[in-house]
Image (spheres, rainbow, N blue to C red):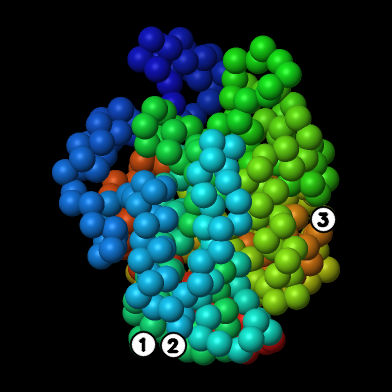
Amino acid sequence: MVSPVEQPSFLNFLEDNKIGFTVLNENVQTLIDAEIKHQATVPKTPREISFNQYYRHSEINIYLEELAVQYPDLVQLESIGLSYENREMVVIKISTGGNGNRPAVLVDGGIHAREWIAPAMALYIIQQLVENNAANSDLTDEVDWYILPVLNPDGYEYSHTSDRMWRKSRSAIPTTTQVCRGVDQNRNYDFHWMENGASDYPCSEIYAGEEAFSEPENQHIRDFAEAHKDQIKLYLTFHSYGEYLLYPWGYTSALPSDWQTLQALAEEVDDAHAAAGGNHFSIGTSTNVLYAAAGGSDDYMKGVVGIDLSFTVELTDTPYGFELPASLIEPTVTRFFEGVRVFGRHVKENF
Ligand code: 0X9
Ligand code: ZN
């Protein structure tokens, strides 16, 4: 994005350097204004969740609590800790039984604040597996699901209240007078931390933190994954945007030894998404298909926790980028749910 003031010099710069370009959005603020208006007009009834609006963090937590009350045999909630600004981070466990020894899928969304479609995707999976369980029972009869819809609740709220394009957490370094806040939580995991595609400058959008796991939110999901690592066979982390299905590694261009399994599974997911009317995704390792960036959750879950099947999903955006209008939530999440089915079935059939 370029501000109106900077636009002429930016265009000159592109021209001088013979850099071709296409404009995706003439005026992103128009989209933001329309979104604010829409968010203010839609009725807020978290219990009957809908997919024509984006929910706030507190509304998401209320919805999870109501599911736990209404479906006590299927749903359990676990508070995994507080965010930097003391928001409660709640993992919903969806399980039809089996004494905790069934294979499980771990899902998170919203590690990047402005990627609003990611928590919405996580919520849709929850809603389908719980409220529409009869139609999706094949996904829960032998597999458990652990889902954390918002891994960066402080940033998510900040993107609703103050800066729609906020990406990072909201922590401040106590020992410095540094004005810039927040850490890119997807550079903060302790696996080849800071080796690649990350910054040690606190004002950078990809600031990796003062040290690995400086962020309480990252510590909480790490501890949760560690505690359930024998059970968890597949990890999915939702982002936007760009329509990518990515698998490790993000810190190196080298391939993991089981890359063919990851590639084949991603291709099957992509086919299901396309059959439901979605676009084809770009598939491959993060480094080779997108860019090198160390300290990401996908690499950590595979490289340290030992969850072999680990994927980053960059959902659909076209042509809105992060500003996906609320009217496109439903088509986006319903199409990708067909891909989620493939992930679920793979776990059911292979573990
Ligand atoms: O840069 C990221 O963290 C992700 N892309 S985003 O545009 N949503 O910010 C991609 C992460 C891929 N995984 C790793 N690099 N480990
Ligand atoms: Zn992201």
Q: Nearer the viewer, residue 247 or 13?
A: 247
- Dot 2 amino acid type: Ser
> What residue sits 39% from the left and 83% below the top?
133
In the drawing, what numbered circle is on residue 134? Answer: 1
Above or below: residue 219 compared with residue 311 = above
Which image quadrant for residue 104? bottom right
> What residue sits 61% from the left and 30% below the top?
171
**Image marks 2 and 1: residues in contact by CB distance under 8 Å:** yes
Q: CA distance from mark 3 to mark 1?
A: 43 Å
Q: Indicate yes or no: mark 2 CB to ligand 2 under 8 Å.
A: no
Q: CA distance from mark 2 to mark 1?
A: 5 Å
- Indicate the position of residue 257 as horizontal and vertical percent values: 83, 68
Above or below: residue 231 compared with residue 213 = below
- Dot 1 amino acid type: Ala
**Image marks 3 and 1: residues in contact by CB distance under 8 Å:** no
In the drawing, what numbered circle is on residue 254? Answer: 3
In the drawing, what numbered circle is on residue 137? Answer: 2
Residue 111 visible in this rendered orientation of the protein: no
Count the marks: how many?
3
Which image quadrant for residue 169? top right
- Dot 3 amino acid type: Ala
